[in-house]
Structures are given as structure tokens and as C-alpha cells.
Amino acid sequence: MTDKLQKRLRQGKKDIARHAGKIATHVASLEEALDYAEAIVRTVREPLIMLDKDLRVEMASRAFYQLFRVTKSQTEGQLIYNLGNKQWNIPKLRTLLESVLPKDIHFDDFKVEHNFPKIGHKTILLNARRFYKDGEHILLAFEDISERTRLMERQISSEQRFRALIEKSEDVIALVDANGKVLYTSPATKRVLGYPPKEFQKLTNPFELVPPEESKIVTTIFQELLQKNGNTARTTYRIRHKDGTYRAIESIMTNLLNDPNVKAVVINYRDVTERQEIEKRKEDFISIASHELKTPITSIKVYTQILMRKMELVSEHGNLPMLQRINAQLNKLSQLVNDLLNVSHIQTGKLPLKSERFNIKELILQAIDDKKELGMQHRVTITSTGSCFVYADRERISQVLINLLDNAVKYSPKSKNINMEITTHGKTCITSIKDFGIGIPKDEQSKIFERFYRSEPDSSKFHGQGLGLFIASQIIQRHGGEIWVKSALGKGSTFYFSIPTKETH
Ligand code: ADP
């Protein structure tokens, strides 16, 4: 062998050694990479599996076992399609997976909805990537979006439900901004006001359709409503229908401008034109009927009293109790008719006052005497700081006093005392009537002055129509005074009313 040849041989060996070293380093780094990939698969929090080129599971992450409640031995070495009762044997997924390797593609967010034997119905997103490491592999990641999907579906269905509620509502529901600009109006706008929603939305504001004589008050109510978040105002006014006629609309407005979900004033419009007409007819009927009833009741009463007197004269006392009962029932009947007549006068604003100056203490003494003559057995004490002159309708104030006295007697079945007090307060005279009876629950104290309101639990025990306090409060208001009550359940009630001492009405 020549020197030259030996030299080349030595050089060749060196080269081989150098390349072997390089190959060893390469192999070592490949093994490292393999360990690295494996370490990732084993530790990631996401459900993940690594498949070989035949789509057999090489390894799976812990999260995968946890999600599908399967073990390592049930998984590793298995074909993906055979995993867990062949639940992944989905044709579309099969096509996708089988094209990942040959075509070197990947896929994202392939959605699988499946009823898994152990974990129930799930919605899963699949993502696949091909990579090379000692051969072909596929990384398949699973994202469980079942909860998210359920929440979204629930949200959509609740949104649809609320939308249907608004869209199918008989009433118009509108959203307006602080300037009154219509942001939304429900389909009922067409039926109630004749305007298709889009056309109604083009109005500068919905109060444009209110007749001039009412629009000022409606605008004021709206402006007041804007002052406080959460405020609600209920009012009835007329709105011009597209056909030119005016409809009576009851509107309920709620200020939800500060509510981040609404950011508007919500207005509910209800057409009450027909209801108002029926109510009017009913009021007219009550007014006519009670007026017509007055005359026959008065004549029956007169004849009954004549008969009573005749029987007393001839000392025929046998039938007297019967006539007295007729008389008592007639008193009740005429009281009811008077109440109905008063109510209908109040409704139509025809409650005339014949005011004069008089001492209210005298009127109170007179009312107590009248009640005693009619059989009142309660003891009434009066406290006053002197005489108190008022300017009022004597008849009407007497009506208020009698009503309050009647109630003090009626609602105090166990106590026989009533205390009355007269005081002057600035330019008013305040009269109070205190009883020690059943009392009125706190939440009902403001309602008892409403028409036909009767306290629930005791309304069956005590006879009445729920009109007396309504009439009394209207009479006092007409005089420019006030009426109120303080009461404790089971202890008694004190009713107060104030009337001006000077001419104000
Ligand atoms: P009525 O007595 O005919 O029911 P009112 O209008 O006079 O009608 O009174 C309305 C309601 O207020 C009554 O049904 C009763 O529940 C309550 N009420 C009125 N006065 C008294 C009182 N002095 N004590 C307790 N409850 C009263």
C-alpha cells in the first residue's frame, strides 16, 4: 500500500468516525425529541392522543383518560375507530383522518356530537396535525365544548322566549331614549295604533301623536320619570291612530336608562278605549239608577214612619218591631244609594260645595247626638283647645264625620270608647277620631281610601261596600284639606282630617 493510499485510508476512517459522531448526535437529539413529544402528550392539560400512520393510538394524555373515562390499556395500541364502542367511527372523521397523512393536511374544529356510554351527551371539537418523528404521526386534540354549547343554547332559547313574549304581546312595547326617540317598537303597534313598527320608529317621539291639550302633561310626566332610575309612571292619554281617530291609551313607562341590558325607557301601551266606554256606560247606569231609586225609597220610608206612629198611637205594639226592622233596612238602603250617587258625582266632577264659616266643634257634637239617637252605644270624648272655625260645606263635612264615627263603631266590636280631638294647625283645623278596635295592617293603610277597597281578612265579618272612606277623602280633597290614618293592628286606628279655616275653594 502506498503512503498516499494509507493516508487516504486514515483520512477515510477519521471521516467515518466524524460522521458516526454526527449520526450519534442526531439519533440522540431524535430520541430527545421523541421523549420531548411524549412528555408533552403525557403532561398537557388538554385531552390529546398521538396516532401512528395506521391510526392506532400510541399514547394519550391524562386529560384524555379523564374526559372519556377510559384506561391506558383500553386505549393504547387500539385503532381510533375501535375506541370506546367504536364511538369515533364517524365516516366524515374517517375521511378527514385518512387524508391528514397522505395529503399532509391538518384540520381544525371538526365538531362531533355523540352520546358517550360513560359520560353522556358531549359536543367535542377535534383538531389534527401531522408530524414526523421516526415515521408518520398524527396529534389529535379534543376540546370539550358541551357546557359552552349548552349555555349558548339556553341563552338563545331564553332570548327567543323573551322575544316571542314581546312580539306576541297584545300591548305595544316600545323602547325610547332620553329624548323620547323610538329605538324599538313591537309588532302590536300596527294593530293598536295603525303604524307598522318601522314607520312608528321614524316619529321624532311618540308624544307627537298626543293631542296638544294633553301633550304638555304627558311630556312633564316623562321628564319627571327621567329624574330617577327605575321610576315607573302610569297615565292614560289619547294618541292619534293612523286612521285619524283618537284612542284612549293607558301607558306605563319605566326608566331603565341606567340598566346596562336595556339602556332605554320602556313604554307599555294598552288600548283602553273600549274599556273606558264600558266604564262610562256603567257609571251612567249607576248614576241614573241611584237617582231614580231615591224617590221610591223616600216615600216607602215616609209611609213606614207614618205606620209606626199610627201603631204607637193605637198601642198596637205587636207589629212594631217588624216595621222598625223595615225602617232600619231602609236606612241602610238609602245610605247605599246615597253613596253610589256621591261616587258618580265625584267621578263626573259634579260634587257641588255650599261652603260657609262654622265652628267644627258644634258640628261634631251634632253628629254624635244624631248617632246616639240612632242607637250608638259607644262613649265619645272630645278634647279641644277652643273653638275652631272652618270654611266648608257643613253637610259634606257632617257626612265625613258620620262615616268616620260609623267605622270607629263598626270596627271596634270589643271596645266602647272613642276619643275625638280638635286642634288648630296653621291655617287648618285638624279633627281626629281614635278608636281601640281591630286596627288596619300597615300595607293597607294607603289603600283604604281607594274606591271599593275593603281590608281582606275582615271584609266578610263587617258589612260594607268600601265606599265611605273614598267619598270622605274626595270631600276633604275638594275642600283643599287632607285625610290620613295612623293605626296598629289589634290596637286601634286614628283617622285625621284637616280643613282650611279660611276660604280657599
Ligand atoms: P266599608 O267600611 O264600607 O268597608 P270604608 O271605605 O269606610 O268602607 O272603609 C274601607 C276599609 O277600611 C274597610 O273595609 C276596613 O277594612 C277599613 N277601615 C275603615 N275604618 C276602619 C277602622 N276604624 N278600623 C279598622 N279598619 C277600618
Image (spheres, rainbow, N blue to C red):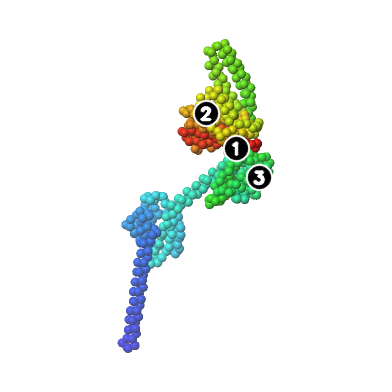
Q: Residue 216 — which label? A: 3
- The type of residue carrying mark 2 is Val
**Disc 1, disc 2: CB below 8 Å?**
no
In this figure, which residue is indicated by the disc labeled 2?
380
In terms of sequence position, does the residue under pointer 3 or pointer 2 come before the other?
3
Front residue of 475/342: it is: 475
In this figure, which residue is indicated by the disc labeled 1?
428
Residue shown at 55% from the left, 21% from the top: 328
Position of residue 37 measured from the top left corner of the image (x, y, whole percent): 37, 65
| Residue furthest out toward the left | 1
Q: Secondary structure at mark 3?
A: helix
Q: CA distance from mark 1 to mark 2?
A: 23 Å
Q: Secondary structure at mark 1?
A: strand
Q: Answer with left or right where residue 22 lies relative to residue 456.
A: left
Task: Name the quarter where the N terminus is drawn.
Answer: bottom left
Does 303 appear above or below 352? above
- The type of residue carrying mark 1 is Thr
**Disc 3, disc 1: CB below 8 Å?**
no
Q: Is residue 382 visible?
A: yes
Q: Answer with left or right where residue 189 lies relative to residue 95.
A: right
